[in-house]
Amino acid sequence: MFKNYIKIAWRNLVKSKVYSTVNILGLAAGLASFIIILLYLNYELSYDKWNPELGKVYKVSIYEKGDYLPASYAPLASFVAQNYPNAEAGTAVQGGMDFDVLLAANDKKIYQKGFVTVDSSFLKVFPYKIIRGDARTALNKPDATVITEALAQKLFGNIDPIGKPIKVFNAVTGTITAIMQEPKTPTHFNAQILMRYSSLEKEQYKNWGNQSYQTYIKLKQPVAEAKLENDINRLYYNERLKKGNQTFEAYKKAGQKTFLYTDAVSNIHNFPKHGESNFKTVSILLILAVLLLLAGVINFSNLAIAKSVGRAKEVGMRKVLGSDRKQLVFQFMSETILQCVISLGIAVFIVFFSLRFINQSFNITLSFWYQNNTSSIFVQIALCLLLVILLSGLYPSLIVSKFNTAKVLKGNYSAGNKGAFFRNSLIVVQFMVSAFFVMAVLIIKSQMHYMQTKDKGFSGEQVMRIETSQKIREEGFSNLQNTFSSIAGVSSIAKTTNVPGDQKEMADTSTFNFKYAGKGLRMASVKVSTDFFKTLKIALVQGRLFNESYTDQNTRSAVINETAFQKFHDNNLIGKTLAFDNCDSIPVKIVGVVKNFNVQGFESAVQPVVYTIGNKACMHQSGGAILVKLNSNHMQKTVTAIEQAWKKIDPDSPIRYSFLDDNFQQLFLSYSRLQSLITFFAIVAILISAMGLFALTAYFTKQRTKEIGVRKVLGATVAQLATLMSKEFVFLVVLSVLLISPFAWWVMNWWLQTFVYRIQISWWLFVLAGFLVLSIALITISFQAVKAALANPVKSLRSE
């Protein structure tokens, strides 16, 4: 029997090629979009799930005096590991995962991301699989280095790298002791090379003033995070913070000024307790994909209902010949199943061939096969298909099976008014989806325009960012400055430890305690050179900028930004002094206030910053880059001259440069991609909705053929008839816009919370979206309405 159903379904599909093609492609578009976002969601949720042991690993961070600190103290890992009974091991690490370091090995030099300095306990915490060497002893030796299999192949080819030297930035030499396998699923900790800095280890790991490490601990048994935090905070308070006889409970009730908090490693990427997460954007994409799939399902259902008019007599004849309602439902459901399976096949084909482009555009690795949860993905797709079949096929099947035999054989195809409310509801839902997409596109586009046109507070035009070693930035800076200054087209040269436009992983977001008038203030510290503000054209608000005086050049003078100025609550700051934490003996005079400027994009607020020159006030800072301002109509010629001069400055390192404007635009890249993706979704949703509306218009026009003929005979004009047939649909479209607007405002406002600096959603965006959707609907409706109104009434009134 089922074989017979499928055979008839196939014949009907082939017979109605145009209808079937539109129906199948509309659903395939919705399914393809949904599957892509489903893969993306599974990809995001697979972060740090590459080993079951990671369920016992937690990152420990610090809240101190109103700030959630991006880094923790050097001895914190060993402190927790030694004092907390449930701790198996602890490790302190440093490194910018997305920062390029120069590696030299086997007569090759390459720039590589993923360089991390670690201690001897790292592999006891992170369960990396060692495929060559011994995990228990790999990091025991001084300057021991562990690299990934891919990096070993890149540097050594087929040569065994164990025991071979590897040099970092032509400064530090390590010995390769092991090769590790990269995780098969994504991780927030993308390490490619692990190096133990033994020469600095003893001093660094015992210094509680060294606040530049990430702390991770591994537990013997997983516990609730609330209990873990309470336990380690009690230890930390008793050993580090306790003064007098105050108990830990009393300290908590008084309002903690400093405490530790933890993040399970598997939650860091998507659900961190503090900081940014991409999951909000992923959630919105999933909502949009579900809505798009819903639009495809409704379109499928509407087209099936419209098509059923042409098959009414077939239903009548089947009933006369003995078919019951159950058999008719099975017949029409089998047609739905066949078309849905074909749609799924086309959707998978589309997804398969578009994944390469998507992976390149979004810098991810979506796949059906290379994930730990492949079977789960196929189960999700199967359940999705089942739901689509039920939603898209069940209602049309029931409608068709209810046709009255006597009426349809006489030419009356109406199923009555019982289903009118449901059909109208489908139209409203479908256009709610389309309107939502249009509103989302307009709001995202407005936010993008705001970010791209808002004053950043500095000028990155024709400013080169040159990556250098610490030695060049410190001892060699004067030589570099003199060499570059002699090049035609070079306007100014500066250095900074925090470069505007750098990716978040590379930017220094650390804050430090400063003392002012007996009070502690937490602010960022940035080391610059004299011409830093001139190079970036940063405006002076009060006082003066740096000069070549002894006090300025030896960290006795500071320039602060407007956010820091507001933190002091003192309008007469110029000439007053502050001090770095635990360094009251060296006062630093505030000589100027500069305008705020955006360093990290618009998701983060501008930090309060203290700018100083040199490392001569009790705190050493490194990192950053050299900035070179060009003022030339012959840019390429100037850049070529800089490249030639670089060979004399640092002959062992190839020059690495970029331009600040380009770097800053890269911060918006993910949102530009999001805008493009949602625009594509919007176009697909509108096309699907238009097809569904076109089909339903044809359906209702067919039902009212005789009514239109009578009205024409009685003198109705084409315009009057078109208005009569369109007004119900226009009302439904307007209703859909009104219903979806509050939801769209809520969702998009929730997304906008990602940005510290954002637009306010204006009412006219919803009006514009409604006008666009209504215009598309009117064009679609008018075609059928005018066609019916122009038909010859003689043909519509004749009886068979």
Image: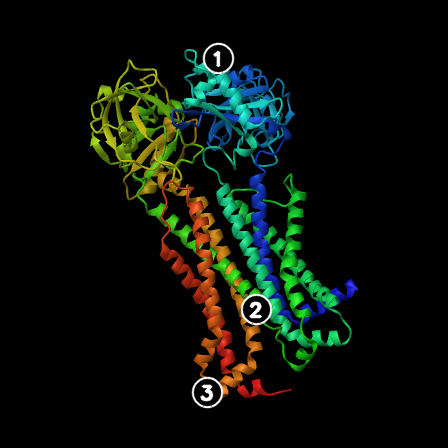
Give the labeled residue for mark 1.
202
Which three-letter amino acid code belongs to the residue tagged 2?
A: Ala
- From the viewer's perspective, is residue 789 above or below residue 75? below
Residue 363 coordinates in the image, percent (x, y) = 51, 42
- From the viewer's perspective, is residue 100 above or below residue 730? above
Circle 2 SS class: helix
Packing grade of label 2 (10 A; few <14, some 14-19, many >=20) is few
Packing grade of label 1 (10 A; few <14, some 14-19, many >=20) is few
Q: Quadrant of residue 106?
A: top right
Q: In the picture provided, is 473 more to the left or to the right than 541?
A: right
Q: Residue at x 43, y 36 (%)?
A: 503
Give the labeled residue for mark 3.
715
Q: Quadrant of residue 521?
A: top left
Residue 75 coordinates in the image, percent (x, y) = 48, 17
Circle 3 SS class: loop
Residue sitting nearer the eye, 497 or 785:
785
Q: Quadrant of the C terminus?
A: bottom right
- The answer to which of marks 1 and 2 sits earlier in the sequence is 1
Give the labeled residue for mark 2.
420
